[in-house]
Image (spheres, helix red, strand yellow):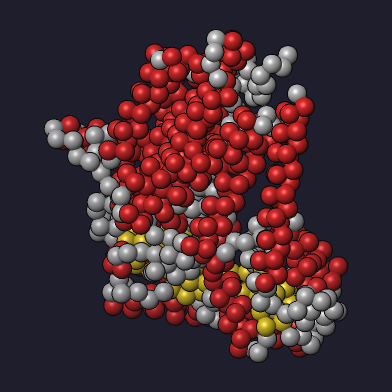
Amino acid sequence: MSQLLTHTFITAFIVAWLAGAMPLMLAAVGETIGEQSGVLNLGIEGTMLVGGYFSYVAALHTHSLWLGMLAGGIMGALLTSVLVILSVWFGLNQIVIGIAVTLLGGGTTAVLFYSNYSQSTPRVPPATWNIPGLSDIPILGKSVFNQHGIFWVSILLMVVVSWLLTRTNWGLSVKAAGQKPLSLDAAGGSVMRTRSEAELLAGFFGGLGGAYLALIATSAFTPFMTAGLGYIAIIVTMLSRGKIYLVAIVALIYGLSVASGTVLQLTALNVPTDLISMLPYLVVMAMLLVFARSVYIPPALAAPYTRGAR
Amino acid sequence: MLTLKSRRTDARLAVVAGFSSLMLVLAACSSSGNSGPSASPSPSSSSSFTAVSIVTPATEADHGWNQMGLKGAKEATTALGLQLDTLTNVGYDNTQTILTQAAKKPGVGLVIAHASGFTQAADKANAATNVPILTVDFPNQQLPGKVGVLTFSAQQGGYLAGIAAAMNTKSNKIGIAISADDLNWFTMSGGFVAGARSVNPKIQIDVAYVGAAAYDDSAGGKKVVQQLIAKGDDVIFGMGDGATIGYIAAIEAATTPVKYIADIGDVSDLIKNPSQYLTSVLWVFTGADTQAIKDVQAGTFANKPYNLDLANGGIALQTTPAMNSATTTATNTAKAGIIAGTISVPLTTSKSQLNALLAK
């Protein structure tokens, strides 16, 4: 037990915690933007996989994690455009199209990976940033303040999204599109355009989540590596009531439970493997139960908008 | 409103047309890529045949179970002048149908069902086609002449790997990373523990699981191995399939010297720094596959289980540049002792048995 209280181990635990939380956080921020506008994106799992795969390819070819992340975000938005066209523009069922997007993203990336990288599975070189002064702080210096710049930019992007949703006219339009799209229409706004913009931004963040998982948390891509993280992001979104800081808190609790699984095993406790696997999901389910009454779903979520229809 | 309906109809037609085109392209690709025998079905004979079929749950890209299974079947059929028909990456759904289809292919006289998850479907596929099927892990599923079973004395290889780990650790702390609750992972881990303790009875051995069935969880694999390394373990024995990529990523990212021991397959082409790749417990299927094919030809198939062990070369410790001469000598001596029966390797077939061994 004393070996678990060393600086090195606690540092590794915090690194694992953040690596578990950040992909979920980014994806859930994306899902929040989309849901606030009234679009339920069940395809976020596929979006994350597409973002993860193309970020991996881009990072391998350009030797730049930054360009990899950008590629992941763009490809995530591109895949989400399927949902935008079919569900937002043509009014097809969002649940059906979302599932199709998940299958499309997972299947396509698996085929591409097996045909291009499965023999060698190259890894993206690990990269860290040292922040002068802060990196020397015991434990936090080598865990939090040693994170790559992508970590800090991701945090900044989430702050920007929070500001966009709460302090700008665009954010107001997004919320109107999800709550009373008719009012937005009557006020001269375009529900279609607002939902399209919001959903493309959601896809970008979903792609970033997958990219973070592949490039930073794993240093590689493997088919279906999200393993249900996209669906957890949907739950996190519903728990967070459209508030980005709540998204961050719930994602951090999830990451903590992921990292704790190994710690529990390395103590003297004889923890069943099934429980370790279930722990993050149990935590999310427990939160869902505890906060069930405060779960907020925009009234117009998943309802296609047809101008002039009653 | 009419316009809206018309747009929706157009969209639906576009989706249907798109998927139909995709299906046609995939069908064309699958038929053009079929390198096996011609597709017209004909009855097979169990004693005289021209081809063997192997069905694997994933592709050979796993650098482990599927890679070595396909390699063994290919070498065995090539040596015996037979064709090999491969069906890879079939997963675990609808396996009875897939095994039946594999058995019905013209000229096929044996189907290798290369996963313990295929066992239940194997006897049903045999009953439907009368083609012998070789499956794995469970000897009680054996049906003489019909369903053969391949078993593994993986603990013997684990024992040698444990010796190699104990002789190469500087911290006297070694770790085992396991991706799933798997019979063979438990047996190999038990052998590893015994082997390491035969060198140093006081060595610290940490065991961490990625999950109950996290074979392909590369992110989880990296997280687990990072924490083992942080605890001070400087030799990691990783059992994983896809999770292996995460193990290797963690070892490459380590700031302290760490060595890696793989299992089943050869991962030397995955690891950038050869000094980090200590060895692998190789599973070589060629001999068992060859014997099974010969038994089918002779009409003696599945009269007893087939087995991979050190004595028949089915289990072997890979020689790498990172293994020094002392380690090679020690593992060779232990190998001889195991084959001669002077060294008894414990068999741990469950997590509780492995935990009991660790607690001793």
Tell me: residue A222, above or below residue A79. below
Q: Nearer the viewer, residue B229 or B312?
A: B229
x and y percent of residue B210 in the render? 48, 47
Note whether A167 is above or below A255 in the view shown. above
Could you say where residue A19 lies in the image, as x and y percent from the top left? 38, 39
Quick check: A301 left or right of B356?
right
**Residue that sits furthest to the left in the current view:** A133
**In this view, B336 is above or below A206:** below
Q: Residue at x 32, y 61 (%)?
A: B259
**Looking at this view, is B95 or A26 the one in front?**
A26
Q: From the viewer's perspective, is A255 left or right of B235? A: right
Q: Residue at x 70, y 66 (%)?
A: B28
Farthest-out residue, front: B3
- For the image shown, how many numbered marks are present on the structure? 0
* Relative depth, front residue between A47 and B129: A47
Image quarter of the N terminus of chain A: top left
Residue drawn where x is 59% and y is 10% of the image: A186
In the rendered image, the vertical position of residue B82 relative to residue B10, given as above or below: below
Is A234 on the left or on the right of A168, as rendered? right
Q: Residue B152, image x and y in percent?
A: 58, 69
Residue name at image x 67 percent, y 83 percent:
B83
- Quarter of the C terminus of chain A within the rendering: top right
In which image quadrant can residue A275 be found?
top right
- Residue B32 seen: yes
Q: Residue A104: give x, y in percent of width and height.
A: 61, 47
Residue B309 visible within the image? no
